[in-house]
Image (spheres, rainbow, N blue to C red):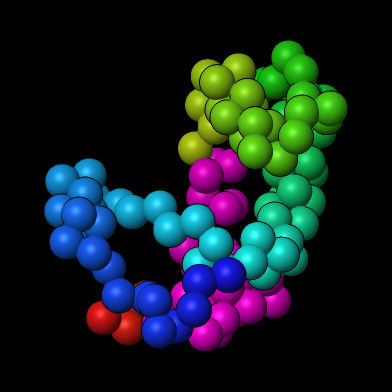
Amino acid sequence: MVNAEHAALSPAQIARFQEQGFLLLPGLIDPAVFEPLIQEFEGIIDSYARQAHADGRLPDPFTNAPFDRRLALIHGAMEDASDLWRLLHGKNQKTAGMFAIFTHPRCWMSWRR
């Protein structure tokens, strides 16, 4: 985990952020913090994939694919998965997992600037 005293970005990191629009900071937030939100997303994605498969809109529900690949596989296999994106974005995610991310001290620290 990154110490708060070492949280300032270097000039190289700032430049990389300005060039690429994002910056990876390994260890800033413990991955376990994201687990409740990932579990919520897994449930939404699983229900959607099973229904889309039953409806004939998805040839394979990709039930054995890991979380970090399954959404991409589903999206790539469907002609139109815009309804899935709507389920996962914005106001639809007023959940305990999302609340935990928004209120985590390290997440809040990065968004308040």
Above or below residue 50? Residue 93 is below
Which of these two is toward me, 103 or 13?
13
Secondary structure mostly taken by the magenta-highlighted segment of the chain: helix
Asked if the magenta segment contains residue 88, the reply would be: yes
Quick one: quadrant of the C terminus?
bottom left
Q: Quadrant of residue 55?
A: top right
In the image, is 15 to the left or to the right of 80? left
Q: Residue at x 65, y 61 (%)?
A: 31
Residue in the picture at 27% in, 68% down: 9
Question: How many labels sit on residues?
Answer: 0
Q: Is residue 96 left or right of residue 25?
A: right
Residue 111, quarter of picture: bottom left
Q: Position of residue 108 (x, y in %)?
A: 44, 82
In the image, the segment drawn in magenta is 83-109
Q: Residue 51 appears at what percent x and percent y?
A: 78, 34
99 is within the stretch colored magenta = yes
- Which image quadrant: the N terminus? bottom right
Q: Position of residue 89 (x, y in %)?
A: 50, 56
Q: Residue at x 52, y 85 (%)?
A: 105
Residue extending farthest to the top is: 59
- Which residue is rendered at x = 43% and y = 58% of the image? 25
On the question of residue 66 being in view, the answer is yes
Asked if one can make out residue 48 in the rendered structure from this viewpoint, the answer is no
Q: Which of the pair 66/31 is nearer the observer?
A: 31
| Position of residue 99 in the picture relative to residue 6 (left or right) | right
Residue 105 higher or lower than 93, as above or below: below
